[in-house]
Image (spheres, rainbow, N blue to C red):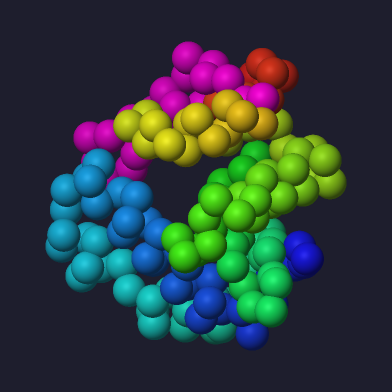
Amino acid sequence: MIRRATVEDASRIAEILVFTKRMNYRKIFQNDKVSFGEIQVYPLAKEYIENPESLENIWVYEDEFVKGMIHIEDNGIAELYVDSFFENQGIGGRLITFAIEEKNCDYLWVLEKNADARRFYETYGFTVTGEKQLQEGTEEYLVEMSLLGKHTI
């Protein structure tokens, strides 16, 4: 089931975000200081608990417990992560379909070097628009993808 995130989900959301980012981004950014020093579960969970409004645009996929999350801003997908233990079970597909069909999402930004994520989004009709921007604080680029070319900046 997909539902709006609550404060009770804070630690699970933080855990998914931290570990999935480490697994997927360490090879791109090659910065262990950030991956293992700055990005930590407890401070992120605490932030969600102390600022429950930050969960307002986050939805979770729950099947006995939270296995994935999607953060939606306006009509864009800001984040979509599935716990690596539950990848390839259709959870990401359910979350992105929810975003497209229920929340009218039609664009997102993804790391240019994250080929797996780009392929995943292409499966659901997103294409690279040609727009790109630096990921803040890094030398890596984000590329915009839009649903069948519908979104324009």
Residue at 47%, 65% (x, y): give it.
85
- Label total for image: 0
**In this picture, residue 34 sits left or right of residue 43:** left
Along the viewing direction, whichever of 90 and 60 lies nearer the viewer: 90
Q: Is residue 20 left or right of residue 94?
A: left
Which image quarter holds the N terminus?
bottom right
Q: Which region of the structure is painted magenta?
A: 125-144
Indicate whether residue 130 is drawn in magenta. Answer: yes
Q: x%, y% of residue 101?
A: 82, 40
Give the x, y percent position of residue 136: 33, 43
Up the image or down, 14 lies above or below 114; here it is below
For residue 53, say whether it is visible. no
Q: Quadrant of residue 104?
A: top right
Above or below 74: residue 8: below
Where the C terminus falls, by quadrant? top right
Residue at position x 47%, y 38% from top? Answer: 117
Residue occupying image coordinates x 32% and y 56%: 23
Furthest toward the front, the residue is: 89
Residue 35 quadrant: bottom left
Residue 101 in sight from this viewpoint:
yes
Inspect the magenta stretch and tell me whether residue 73 lies in it.
Answer: no
Res 61 quadrant in image: bottom right
Residue 58: where, in percent of width, then height?
A: 65, 61
| Camera-side residue of 16 and 44 | 16
Q: Residue at x 57, y 33 (%)?
A: 121
Residue 55 locus on image (x, y percent)? 64, 68
Q: Main secondary structure of the magenta part?
A: strand
